[in-house]
Structure formats: structure tokens, C-alpha cells
Amino acid sequence: MSILIFESSATGYFEAGCLQRDLAQKGLDRNAWDRSGSWFSGGVRQLYGFLATKQDLDAFNQHSQGSLPD
């Protein structure tokens, strides 16, 4: 699991939203992530993307070696 951090600005938020919408159109959004039983598709890692919530970041921090700033 990885997190992509965008610039902390209106532009960064806009770019994150564009990526989320693009992945949602391809069926690779939060709903697909929640339904998926595997991180792989056809033997290749599958990329999913959505805007993270605080709970997402907390879960990421629990399972990563480093942690994200609050």
C-alpha cells in the first residue's frame, strides 16, 4: 500500500481530484478497492485510487514502517 501526497494547495487538491475521477471512470476507485479481494489483476499489481480520509491515514500508519505527519 502506498500513499501519493499532492501539493498542499488548491492546485494539489484539484490534481488529486482529477486522478481520483480518472480512476473512478476506470472502475478503480474506493468501491472497487473495498470489493477487491486482491491487489493483483492478471498477475500484475492493480492501482486503485481515492481521496483518503483520516481513518485511511490512521490505518496506513498502523501498517507502515514510517508514518505520515498529522
Image (tube, rainbow, N blue to C red):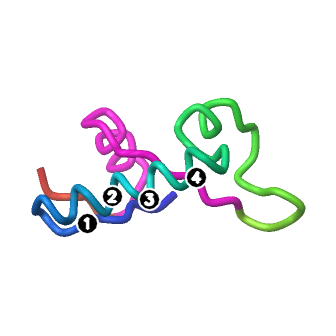
- Range shown magenta: 46-65
Q: Which mark is residue 48?
A: 4
What amino acid is at disc 4? Tyr
Q: Position of residue 31 (x, y in %)?
A: 58, 31
Asked where in the image residue 8 lies, by quadrant, the reply is bottom left
Mark 2 and mark 4 lie on one chain; the one further toward the N terminus is 2
Q: Is residue 44 above or below residue 16?
A: below
Which residue is situated farthest in the right direction here? 42
Q: Position of residue 46 (x, y in %)?
A: 69, 59
Position of 42 with respect to 52 (left or right) is right
* Tag 2 and tag 1, C-beta contact below 8 Å: yes
Instruction: Look at the image and say whether residue 51 sits in the magenta stretch.
Output: yes
Which residue matches tag 1?
Answer: 6
Q: Residues within 10 Å of mark 1 (few under 14, many from 20)?
A: few
Asked where in the image residue 34 lies, by quadrant, the reply is top right
Q: Residues within 10 Å of mark 4 (few under 14, many from 20)?
A: some
Q: Residue at x 39, y 60 (%)?
A: 3
Position of 8 with respect to 13 (left or right) is left
- Spatial CA distance of label 2 from label 4 is 13 Å
Instruction: Look at the image and say whether residue 17 sits in the magenta stretch.
Output: no
Position of 26 with respect to 30 (left or right) is right
What amino acid is at disc 2? Ala
Q: Which mark is residue 19?
A: 3
Mark 1 and mark 4 lie on one chain; the one further toward the N terminus is 1
The mark lying in front, picked from 4 and 3, is 3
Q: Residue at x 58, y 52 (%)?
A: 48
Q: Which mark is residue 16?
A: 2
